[in-house]
């Protein structure tokens, strides 16, 4: 029965009640008649118009449920991006794009490890605020999966409910590799970076790899279980690595190099990625997060320098003979002459001008045997020498593979090959620029970043892949390479005061590298996205 027929039936009932037997109805009779008429209306609505009434309620319920599902998807997306180490300067723009395309009125406030999400209701003029807090590290495979879910939901390939369930499964999934596997990966990464960036020898690379494996185990096991130890984790491991490196570096015969072992041993906890993200946020006008991260990274670098200095000085305090060995090592590249200063026109020496003259070759002279802070006598055997240049042809791809897997990238995936290829191209550009402009670490880093950003964004633009995950390995490769070009984290043949002040120089050098990388990334991105149609969603790249 339609709504119009119900209205006609109601009018007929009213006429029948008014035409009663010519008498006026009492109050009780009128109430009883009104009660009957309402009861009949209810029966008519339930029996005759189920599709009118219940369809309206069903539509309203479906609309409300769908809106809640879209809100839930945005909240879960924010948590996943924070937890998996997505580029923080892109998170807010990605969430805004998701809210606009999903037709959800929402506002965001992004703080370090925290996102404030406020859903607004224009009908009731109220808002619902959520605090999303998460912290984690980069997981390349999961980030690639999140990007696909994000793109499918925004392109209407899947619904918000299904997208939320897929994000939930990604969050609950266990890490791809166990703790022991990741310690082995850290061993290989530190071993290879020792000879590639810090001038280490064959024996140095094994010691630095063992130090990095110990560091990784403490970070994944002890620091994750104990909040108290997590606060002093970086300082403690830097002290242990520096103590071990100094003990080996002062063994007679100069078999081990302190600078190479200590620099490569702590390279996995360098805040290079944090400084890079801070520079990217400052460039993106995200002043609050960028300044906080930048100050944190600088203070963190000072902590590392302090730990390295304490570890070295503590061993020199325990073993006083090591100071004499250290002084003797610093003079190996010097030539000592005993003699007098003579008159130009006389063969007799000038009175009281006899002396001992020491001539030292600097590293910039081209004749010094100190290579990146390590003394290397050319007469030594091959296992005590730095690796020749042609070994980079296979060491760089091997390091890129282990670095990608250490960042939780699946082995059986085409993404791994793409990451390795982009990393090798960026390293080649970085080495070429360093050969041409060796005294400008910012320009050298900008050239490598420009090349890898060009490759990554073109890959995302043309093929449809994930630009960020394909670029992470190469970008992380630029930081230790640039630091290694400056001689490592800390110089071995200097006083403790000079080494401590050198940590300030290390912080400045890392900022220069981050600025160069930032400029290179943004310039290449502008060149790639100038042509072609505009993206319907936010960029998932550096």
Image (cartoon, helix red, strand yellow):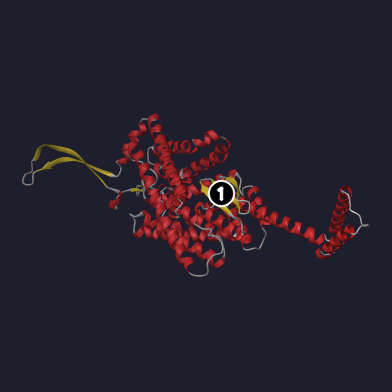
Name the residue carrying label 1. Answer: 82
Label 1 neighbourhood size at 10 Å, few (<14), some (14-19), many (20+)?
Answer: many
Identify whether 228 is placed above or below 365. Answer: above
Q: Residue at x 67, y 61 (%)?
A: 158
Q: Residue furthest left?
A: 345
Q: Residue furthest right?
A: 21
Quadrant assignment, res 427: bottom left
Asked whether 457 or 61 is in front, the reply is 61
Identify whether 356 is placed above or below 80. Answer: above
Q: Image check: 19 left or right of 343?
A: right
Q: Image check: 225 left or right of 433?
A: right
Q: Quadrant of the N terminus?
A: bottom right
> In the rendered image, is residue 412 in sight?
no
Secondary structure, mark 1, is helix
Quadrant assignment, res 18: bottom right
In the rendered image, residue 218, in percent from the top left (x then y), is placed at 54, 38
Identify whether 398 is placed above or below 265. Answer: below
Asked whether 531 or 372 is in front, the reply is 531
Q: Residue at x 51, y 58 (%)?
A: 541
In the rendered image, residue 524, in percent from the top left (x then y), is placed at 45, 63
Asked whether 158 or 411 is in front, the reply is 158
In the rendered image, residue 538, in percent from the top left (x then y), is placed at 54, 60
Q: Image check: 371 left or right of 413?
A: left
Numbered disc total: 1
Q: Image check: 241 left or right of 175?
A: left
In the rendered image, residue 29, in percent from the top left (x then y), is placed at 89, 50
Q: Residue furthest front?
A: 23
Asked whether 526 or 248 is in front, the reply is 526
> In the rendered image, is residue 504 in sight?
yes
């Amino acid at each position: 029965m339609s709504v119009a027929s119900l209205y006609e039936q109601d009018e007929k009932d009213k006429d029948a009640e008014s035409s009663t037997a010519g008498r006026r109805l009492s109050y009780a009779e009128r109430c009883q008649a009104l009660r009957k008429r309402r009861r009949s209306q209810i029966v008519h609505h339930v029996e005759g118009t189920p599709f009118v009434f219940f369809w309206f309620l069903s539509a309203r319920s479906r609309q409300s449920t769908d809106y809640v599902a879209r809100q839930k998807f945005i909240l879960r997306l924010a948590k996943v991006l924070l937890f998996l180490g997505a580029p923080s300067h892109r998170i807010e723009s990605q969430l805004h794009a998701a809210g606009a395309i999903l037709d959800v009125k929402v506002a965001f406030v992004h703080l370090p490890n925290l996102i404030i999400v406020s859903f607004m209701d224009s009908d009731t003029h109220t808002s619902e605020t959520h605090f999303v807090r998460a912290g984690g590290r980069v997981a390349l495979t999961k980030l690639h999966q999140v990007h696909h879910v994000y793109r499918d939901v925004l392109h209407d390939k899947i619904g918000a409910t299904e997208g939320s369930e897929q994000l939930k499964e990604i969050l609950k999934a266990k890490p791809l590799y166990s703790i022991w596997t990741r310690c082995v990966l850290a061993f290989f990464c530190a071993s290879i970076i020792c000879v590639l960036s810090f001038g280490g020898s064959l024996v140095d690379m094994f010691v630095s790899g063992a130090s990095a494996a110990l560091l990784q185990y403490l970070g994944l096991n002890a620091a994750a279980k104990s909040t108290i130890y997590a606060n002093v984790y970086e300082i403690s491991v830097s002290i242990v690595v520096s103590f071990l490196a100094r003990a080996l570096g002062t063994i007679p015969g100069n078999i081990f190099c302190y600078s190479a072992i200590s620099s490569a041993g702590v390279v996995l906890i360098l805040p290079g990625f944090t400084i890079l993200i801070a520079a990217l946020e400052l460039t993106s006008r995200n002043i609050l997060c960028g300044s906080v991260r930048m100050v944190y990274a600088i203070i963190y670098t000072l902590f590392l320098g302090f730990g390295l200095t304490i570890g070295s000085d503590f061993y020199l305090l325990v073993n006083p003979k090591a100071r004499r060995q250290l002084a003797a090592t610093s003079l190996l590249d010097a030539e000592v002459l005993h003699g007098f200063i003579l008159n130009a026109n006389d063969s007799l020496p000038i009175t009281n001008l006899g002396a001992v003259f020491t001539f030292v070759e600097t590293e910039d002279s081209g004749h010094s045997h100190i290579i990146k802070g390590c003394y290397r006598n050319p007469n030594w055997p091959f296992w005590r020498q730095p690796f020749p240049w042609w070994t980079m042809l296979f060491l760089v791809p091997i390091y890129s593979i282990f670095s990608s897997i250490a960042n939780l990238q699946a082995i059986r995936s085409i993404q791994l090959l793409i990451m390795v290829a982009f990393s090798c191209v960026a390293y080649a550009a970085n080495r070429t620029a360093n050969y041409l402009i060796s005294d400008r670490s910012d320009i050298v880093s900008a050239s490598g970043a420009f090349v890898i950003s060009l490759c990554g964004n073109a890959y995302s633009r043309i093929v449809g892949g994930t630009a960020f995950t394909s670029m992470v390995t190469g970008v992380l490769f630029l930081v230790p390479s640039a630091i290694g070009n400056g001689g490592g984290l800390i110089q071995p043949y200097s006083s403790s005061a000079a080494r401590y002040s050198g940590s300030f120089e290390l912080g400045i050098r890392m900022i220069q590298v981050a600025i160069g990388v930032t400029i290179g990334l943004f310039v290449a991105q502008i060149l790639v996205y100038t042509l072609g149609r505009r993206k319907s969603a936010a960029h998932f790249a550096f």
